Structures are given as structure tokens and as C-alpha cells.
Image (cartoon, rainbow, N blue to C red):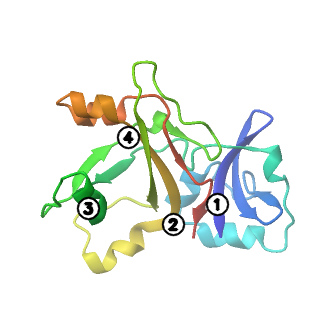
Amino acid sequence: MKLSSFTRNGTHGYGVVDANGIIDLTTAIDGVSDLKGLLESDRLAQAADSAVGRSADFALEDIEFLPLIPNASKVICVAVNYLAHAREAGRTIGDYPVLFHRHAQTQIGHQQPLLVPKSSEQLDFEGEIAVILGKGGAHIEPEDAMDYVAGYSCYNEGSIRDWQFHVHNTAWARTSMPPEDSARGWLHR
């Protein structure tokens, strides 16, 4: 099942993406008005049931994709997570992951432009995978980790390299720029 957040005629919604467009679920599940709420309520099976046998409500060209989770509370990224890329950048992979965060308002929807600030000449972009968690947790055992994963999506990560490499606070440079990251348009479940 492919899920997405979208806007149509100024109204935000979420739904299932199929070959013919979007099956709108915005009002289909009581108490769930957005994709974040759907994931947090652990009602993905109900969403799938709501879409069975229904035709698309809107063609994809009639909607504008929003960030997958427009109201995300956290966007946590892992740097230096690909050995070949780390080597070409002259970096090593340590024993612990290098984490940084992105501000939710820097996320953009599928087919939206990556913006380059006027103060930069070096936009770099990389294909990544986004793992979307459906519930929070702490001290999770490795064998239980997938119980927290709601789905995944392709993710286009943009970095302003000239800012990233000339300041010491690279976390700020990575997270404080204009909208520059986008997911593919849907979450796969």
C-alpha cells in the first residue's frame, strides 16, 4: 500500500496512491485527519480496508504532494552511512552512527523544487531511503525494531555544501536552510 499526504484546492488530505490516482482517506477513518495521525493510531489495516474496491478520487495531476508527514515532530538523519560514499569523501565510519536532525519545515513534497539560498552556490543532493516510524520508543531491542517502522520512502536529501564545510557547526548548516528535502511522494507499507 502506498500512502501520501496532499493538498487539493487548498484542502489538506491523505490517502492511498494507486495506478489511477489518490483514494482520499481524509474523512474515512474516525478521529484520523492526517497521515501522522493514521500512523500514530496504528490503524493502517483499517486504511487498507477503507481503500479496497474504491476507485481513485483524484488524478495525481489534480493534487499537489505535501511532505509525507507535513506535521512531523522529528526528522532524524544518519550521516556517513554508506561506506563507498564515506571513502570518496575521505571519511571513516565509526562505531556509532552520526545523527543530525532536519527541521520539519524544510521538508517538501514530491515534485516540488529544491531551493538554493542566495548565499550558496553548492547544492548537493543525494538519494536516500526514509524510514518512517509509526510510534515512539526507547531502549528497543534490535529484534523488535521493525515493529516501530510504519513504512519507507525514497528521499532526496539536499545539502548546502559550501555552508556545511566552512562553519564548525555543521548541524546548523544542515538543518537551517530553506526547503530542500523531499520524499518520493508516498510511504510504502
Q: Residues within 10 Å of mark 3 (few under 14, many from 20)?
A: few
Which residue position is annotated with label 1?
Answer: 3
Q: How far apart, in angstroms, are the residues tagged by discs 1 and 4? A: 22 Å
* Secondary element at tag 3: loop
Q: Is residue 44 left or right of residue 168?
A: right
Mark 2 and mark 4 lie on one chain; the one further toward the N terminus is 4
Please provide percent x and percent y for residue 68: 57, 50
Of circles 2 and 3, the one toward us is 2
Which residue position is annotated with label 2?
Answer: 151
Q: Residue furthest left?
A: 95
Q: Quadrant of the C terminus?
A: bottom right
Which residue position is annotated with label 3?
Answer: 138
At 34% from the left edge and 51% from the top edge, which residue is drawn?
A: 77
Q: Amino acid at mark 1?
A: Leu
- Placement of 99 over or under 178, stated as above or below: below
- In this orientation, does residue 124 appear? yes
Q: How far apart, in angstroms, are the residues tagged by discs 2 and 3? A: 19 Å
Mark 4 and mark 3 lie on one chain; the one further toward the N terminus is 4
**Residue 102 numbered mark, or none:** 4
At 72% from the left edge and 51% from the top edge, which residue is drawn?
A: 26
Mark 1 and mark 4 lie on one chain; the one further toward the N terminus is 1
